């Protein structure tokens, strides 16, 4: 319930303890935990559910949420061990290096120095093993994937949330999150390249706070043109993770 109290607090529907939105969100999440007791509830789910409750009845929101979890690649973001989340860290770094190589190299070197005390590139960290490989992108992208830019340390303007959800429902996957991530860092590329390790890490964690007008950000995201083929099928990724485990 603490997670519910922190979800979309800037929106009037969810504002204030005991608000109608908070009560509805609590019921939906409890219903899903009963519907899928193996998974139950994991922090971050409330962000996706909250956006749905803004635009449909509680019952409809529940069934759409269940569909998102089971058919749009969300289940692996919240399942024990976060199998799909780890896959998406890798996908993000691959896309980041391909689309914005200079910035990706700078981020890898500076954030690894911030974490480890010495600069390393992403490939070097990958050779050290899974924990090292996931460390860099997990520092700032976890909230992107698990809260759809709505919660955590990186809340985007509430006007962006329905547009993100529309794309997830239309595409049947969360490729739009990758597109938005690339759009965010590209918009702040010049500033990010100037930042030292300590300030860069914090800037990446809160990058949505300076994202600017939603229309400009979405236009740039669409130009990134990230599709499921770029991030891989959620079902395939989860199957691969399970096999590797």
Image (tube, helix red, strand yellow):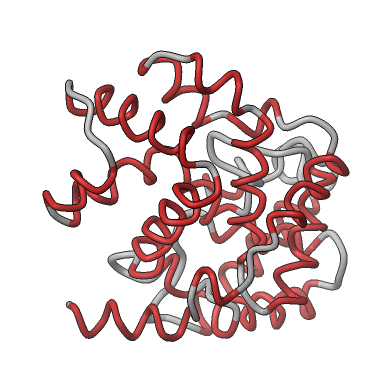
Where residue 165 sits, quadrant-wise, is bottom right
| In the foreground, 198 or 43 | 198
- Name which residue lies at 67% across and 43% down: 183
Residue at 54% x, 34% y is 153
Q: Is residue 155 above or below residue 75?
A: above
Determine which quarter of the picture holds residue 52. bottom right
Residue 123 placement (x, y as % from top left):
24, 48
Most extreme residue toward the left is: 128
**In the figure, residue 60 lies in which quadrant?**
bottom right
Screen quadrant of the C terminus: bottom left
Q: Residue at x 53, y 42 (%)?
A: 100
Q: Where is residue 37 in the image (x, y as percent from the top left)?
A: 42, 81
Q: Position of residue 105 (x, y in %)?
A: 38, 35
Relative horizontal placement of residue 54, taking residue 114 as reference (left or right)? right
Left or right: 234 as drawn, with respect to 172: left
| Image spot of residue 44 (x, y percent) | 52, 54
Q: Which of 49 and 162 is in front in this view?
A: 162
The answer to whether 131 is drawn above or below residue 165 in the figure is above
Left or right: where 153 falls relative to 131: right
Residue at (46% x, 22% y) in the render: 202
Count of numbered tags: 0
């Amino acid at each position: 319930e603490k997670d519910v109290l922190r979800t979309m607090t800037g929106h009037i529907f969810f504002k204030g303890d005991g608000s109608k939105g908070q009560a509805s969100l609590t019921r939906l999440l409890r219903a899903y935990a009963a519907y899928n007791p193996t998974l139950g509830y994991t922090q971050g789910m409330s962000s996706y559910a909250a956006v749905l409750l803004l635009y449909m009845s509680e019952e409809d929101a529940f069934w759409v949420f269940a569909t998102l979890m089971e058919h749009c690649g969300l289940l692996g973001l919240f399942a024990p061990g976060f199998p799909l989340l780890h896959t998406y860290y890798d996908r993000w770094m691959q896309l980041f290096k391909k689309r914005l190589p200079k910035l990706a190299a700078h981020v890898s070197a500076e954030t690894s120095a911030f974490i480890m005390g010495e600069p390393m590139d992403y490939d070097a960290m990958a050779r050290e093993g899974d924990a090292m490989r996931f460390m860099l992108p997990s520092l700032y992208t976890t909230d992107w994937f698990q809260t759809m830019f709505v919660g955590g340390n990186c809340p985007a303007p509430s006007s962006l949330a329905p547009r993100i959800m529309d794309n997830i429902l239309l595409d049947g996957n969360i490729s739009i999150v990758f597109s938005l991530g690339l759009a965010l860092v590209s918009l702040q590329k010049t500033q990010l390249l100037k930042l030292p390790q300590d300030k860069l890490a914090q800037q990446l964690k809160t990058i949505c706070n300076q994202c600017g007008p939603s229309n400009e950000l979405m236009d740039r995201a669409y130009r990134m043109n990230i599709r499921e083929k770029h991030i891989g099928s959620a079902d395939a990724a989860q199957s691969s993770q399970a096999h590797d485990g």
